[in-house]
Each structure stands twice: as structure tokens, then as C-alpha cells.
Image (cartoon, rainbow, N blue to C red):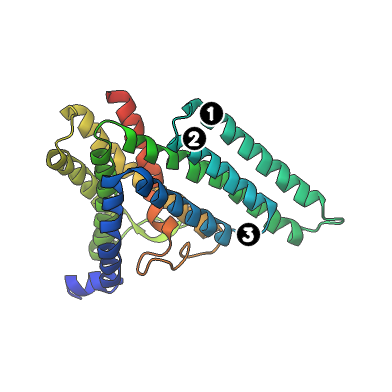
Amino acid sequence: MTVRKHLFAGGLATRLLSAAVGMPIIIGAILIGGPLFSALLALSLAIGLLEIARIARLNRRSPIFFVAVAAIGAIMGVATSDANVSLLWPILASGIGIAGVATVVAVRSIPEPDPEQLKPLLVGGLAMLGSVLYLAIPGSTFVFVRAADQGADWMLLAVLAVMAADAAAYAGGRLLGRRQLAPSVSPNKTVEGAVFGWLGGFGATLALDQILNLDVQLWPLVLLAIVLPISSQLGDLAESLFKRAMDVKDSSNLIPGHGGVLDRLDSLLFGLPVVYFFLQWTT
């Protein structure tokens, strides 16, 4: 099979078309910032939460779901306002605590529970507890990075470098993939794809620094270029582990060729905190 057939056999044309539609919106929101950036981020996190509930087979009218919505909304509200960032932690603790109590109350409301009744409640409750940590805290770093000096440029570097790592991993895996990386988590991921992904992310980070003329020294930048593509691939694996446990292939079919919003956010949810802490360290 030719290189072209190898790539396009996996639906590359559809993936590219979706990217061509979505990328101008994402880049525009990053460059413009303000309410447009906040709205796109809030919409993405909201859809991500709905997808987590779908994967966990949780009724979206469940009190546990509304607790997660409220906790994530409060955390992002603090992050996007001028409020003291230290408020994030008590809100996070309160959200997790209330979601935990709601789960216990739901379980105890069943007169004579059996394992088949308890399982969806416990899985849904744990998924909502996890979603507060998985979506809200990393999501807040999107806001903090965008608000930093040269914030739009740093956001572009993070998003584009992570996308380059994803694309390189996909291409490397399709063309050269032989050895499975984590067969029990994601059978389609290969060692070769992971290496290509790291190389793509590393090279993109260094190239984007030159293009965007970022104010950063070489050695810290090299460290970021090493760590960022690793963290983004860990994010991809983390979501794959959750989907595998729930016997689900994609978080949804909202984005043709890509799956759901969560399937696009997973790498960024691990990558953006790395950029945030990098900026805290270097500035």
C-alpha cells in the first residue's frame, strides 16, 4: 500500500476538512481573546462534561451532574474574573465534597440496592468527581496562559505544538507503526507513533518560538519542547483509559474524523498546565 493510501485509509481527508473548518475559529478566538476566547473555552468544557456523562452512562438530570456543572462553572468563573485565584481551591474542594455527598445520598436512597443498581450510580458519581479535576483545573490554566505577557502567542504555541504532536503521532503510527504502545489501553497506539509525535511536538515548539518571537531563553525552551509533547500524549492515553474502561471508542461523533470535543481536548488538558507552570517558572 502506498504512503498516500496508508494515510487516507484512516479517514485523513475527513480529519483535514474538520481541521480546516475549526482551526480559523480557534486561532481567531486566541488572538482576539476576551469574551470570544472565554465563550469558546466554556462551550468546549461544557460539551466535554456532557461527553463524560455520556461515556459514564450518567443521567444528565441526576443531581450529581448538576453539582459538577456548578463546580466547574464556579471555578471557571473565578479564573476568568479578577477574583483572587486562591478561591479556586475551596471551590474545587466544595465541588468534590458536594458531588461525593450527592453520590452517597443517591446510593442510600435505594431501599435494597444490588450491584446492578449501584454500579451506574457509583461510576457516574466518580466520573463527575473526576470531571471537576479533569476539566476545571486544567481549563483554568487556559485562561491564565492567555492572560500572561505574550499570552496569545503562548496559547498559539501550546495549541499548535500539541496539534503537531497529534498529527505526527497519527502519521507515524499509520505509516510505520508496528509495536503497540499500550495495548490494554489503546490498541491502535504504537511506539513508533509516540516517537513521531514527540519529534513533531519538539520541532513545532522550537519552530513556533522563532515564528512568534517569544521572550524566552534557549535552555528553558528546550525543556518545554521536551516535556510538552510527552504531557500531551499522556493526556491522550488518560482519556483512552477512561473510554476503554467504559467500552467506548469515541467520546462522541460531533467532529467528523476526530470524534468528540473531549477527543480533541484531551492532549491540551495535560499540555496547557505544563505551559502555565513553565511561565510561572520563567517569568
Amino acid bearing label 2: Val
In the picture, the quarter occupied by the N terminus is bottom left
* Mark 3 crowd level (few <14, some 14–19, many ≥20, 10 Å Cα): few
* Mark 2 crowd level (few <14, some 14–19, many ≥20, 10 Å Cα): some
Return the residue nearer the eye: 25 or 197.
25
Q: Which residue is at 26% across, 38% downward?
A: 154
- Residue matched to label 2: 78
Whole-number angstrom distance, CA of label 2 to CA of label 3: 25 Å
Whole-number angstrom distance, CA of label 1 to CA of label 3: 27 Å
Amino acid bearing label 3: Arg
Instruction: Give x and y (percent) for residue 201.
Output: 24, 46
Instruction: Give x and y (percent) for residue 139.
Output: 43, 42
For residue 173, side relative to residue 183 (left or right): left
Give the label on residue 52, or none: none
- Residue matched to label 1: 87
Return the residue nearer the eye: 253 or 185.
253
- Residue matched to label 3: 60
Q: Are marks 1 and 2 in contact (CB under 8 Å)?
A: yes
Mark 2 element type:
helix
Q: Quadrant of residue 273?
A: top left
Q: Which residue is at 41% across, 50% downward?
A: 39
Badge nearest the viewer, 2 or 3: 2
Which residue sits furthest front? 35
Instruction: Give x and y (percent) for residue 198.
Output: 26, 47
Mark 3 element type:
loop
Q: Is residue 16 above or below residue 159?
A: below
Amino acid bearing label 1: Leu
In the picture, the quarter occupied by the C terminus is top left
Badge nearest the viewer, 1 or 3: 1
